[in-house]
Image (cartoon, rainbow, N blue to C red):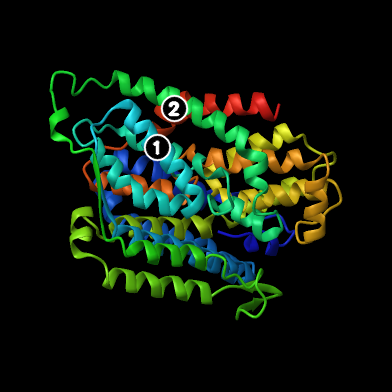
Amino acid sequence: MSANILLSITHQTPATWLILPFVSLLLLIAIGPLFFAHFWHKYYKAISVIFGALVGGYYLIVKQQPIIVAETFAEYTSFICLLFSLYVAAGGIFVFADFESKAKINIVFLLIGAILTNFIGTTGASVLLIRPFMRVNRYRLKPYHIVFFIFFVSNLGGLLTPIGDPPLFMGFLKGVPFFWTLQHLISPWLVAMFLLCVIFYFFEKSNSQLDDIDVSSNYTQKIIINGKQNFIWLALIIGSVFIDPNVIDGIPFIDMHGKKVSFIREILQLAIAFIAYKKANKHALQSNGFDFEPIKEVAFLFFGIFLSMIPALQLLESAGSSIAEPLSHSVLYWASGLFSSVLDNAPTYVNFLALSLSMFGLSVNNINDIHAFIASNNVIYLEAISVGSVFFGALTYIGNGPNFMVKAIAEQQGVKMPSFFQYIAKYSIPILLPVLLVVWLLFFM
């Protein structure tokens, strides 16, 4: 998701009641699978579309602001095209890591996944690695394995490059140098990885499911990969992300009141996904249990989230513009993080980046202002917003697109995943929040 939606929103503050569809949808996502699972799984598509259409229709008919709806839909299209393409391409790669499920093996796996995320993105790494990770732990797989995978691979791991996580890519498009993240954010990344490894180790040691069973002779200690040709399609999809009319001159685009909206990139991604699926190794698809249900769930739910959160983003922008004195970078770390956990971290990042620049008389739309900001002592604001937006995306299932996808894939394989609130109460607050607190104390207090 990009920043266009945020930058096109008018300064008129919407009525507070307009966030009710967004809040209601989040609430239903949280309690639906827990209290009325059959009804929710049968009708969640219709519910999400209705909530999104209500807000979209209001902005079209009542407020007569079609450009906001059009840009939001364009942002959604770019978002889902990338997720869909990566899902299809990675789904045709079957990776079987035949190792015994031990704490050190799983920690190495998660760390490799966290590093890989910076090369193929949180979505690509999540789809590629979640099934092999579950296979390694097939005799003792617990929900906490999937949750820590979301922490490591689907979110926190992707802090080091703009490819790693959508918020950082938005910063790159705005003018933040490609290697700035690696140079400035490596320390928070290392601290977070270390703390998560320590906590995960204790979880592993408490998992005694195989203590009375000797299965060590069942493992070949080999890695088997089928469908290697799909790595080519995966690389092409990742490369297509950079085909952006806002970055490269000459690429056709749709002009929306001066905003360059991409469509060539999305067509190319869907075309690659189609070829990847048609040419995929059938054994790899079958071994992965590949079908389109997980990505369909993500597509429908985020359609409603994208449209219904327009008023929430407007209210956030309005609140930021009314601030009389500059906020501290400490406040922006927590604010950008907490909003990222429920509003999707890419637009939240851009909104707080714009706020930070405006506090010092600079503009997020001026690349020279971006460079001046980075060269000044105020660069700590960019560091705080970057870390907050990426790390806090793991606080809820909806904080980052891959979270829901990993959850859906795990449930498809029979893992009883925690509900929305259980995830927060059992894992986010007691495990992730202390890690975020330590990072704040060390780097942003």
User: Which amino acid does the dot numbered 2 rest on?
Assistant: Cys
Q: Answer yes or no: do the residues labelled 2 and 1 have beta carbons within 8 Å? A: yes
Spot occupied by residue 294 in the image (x, y as percentages of width and height): 31, 55
User: Which amino acid does the dot numbered 1 rest on?
Assistant: Leu
The quadrant of the rendering that contains the N terminus is bottom right
The residue lying at 54 percent from left, 54 percent from top is: 163
The quadrant of the rendering that contains the C terminus is top right
Residue that numbered label 1 is attached to? 110
Spot occupied by residue 335 in the image (x, y as percentages of width and height): 65, 38
* CA–CA distance in space, label 2 to label 1: 9 Å
Q: Specify whether 429 is left or right of 379.
A: left
The quarter of the displayed image where residue 182 is located: top right
| Closer-to-camera residue (338/329) | 329
Residue that numbered label 2 is attached to? 197
Spot occupied by residue 7 in the image (x, y as percentages of width and height): 70, 61
Q: Is residue 97 visible?
A: no
Chain-order first, disc 2 or disc 1:
1
Q: Specify whether 367 is left or right of 145.
A: right
- Residue 294, compared with residue 214, is above or below; it is below
Q: Specify whether 317 is left or right of 273.
A: right
Instruction: Determine whether the residue tagged by mark 1 lies in a helix, strand or loop.
Output: helix
| Closer-to-camera residue (224/422) | 224
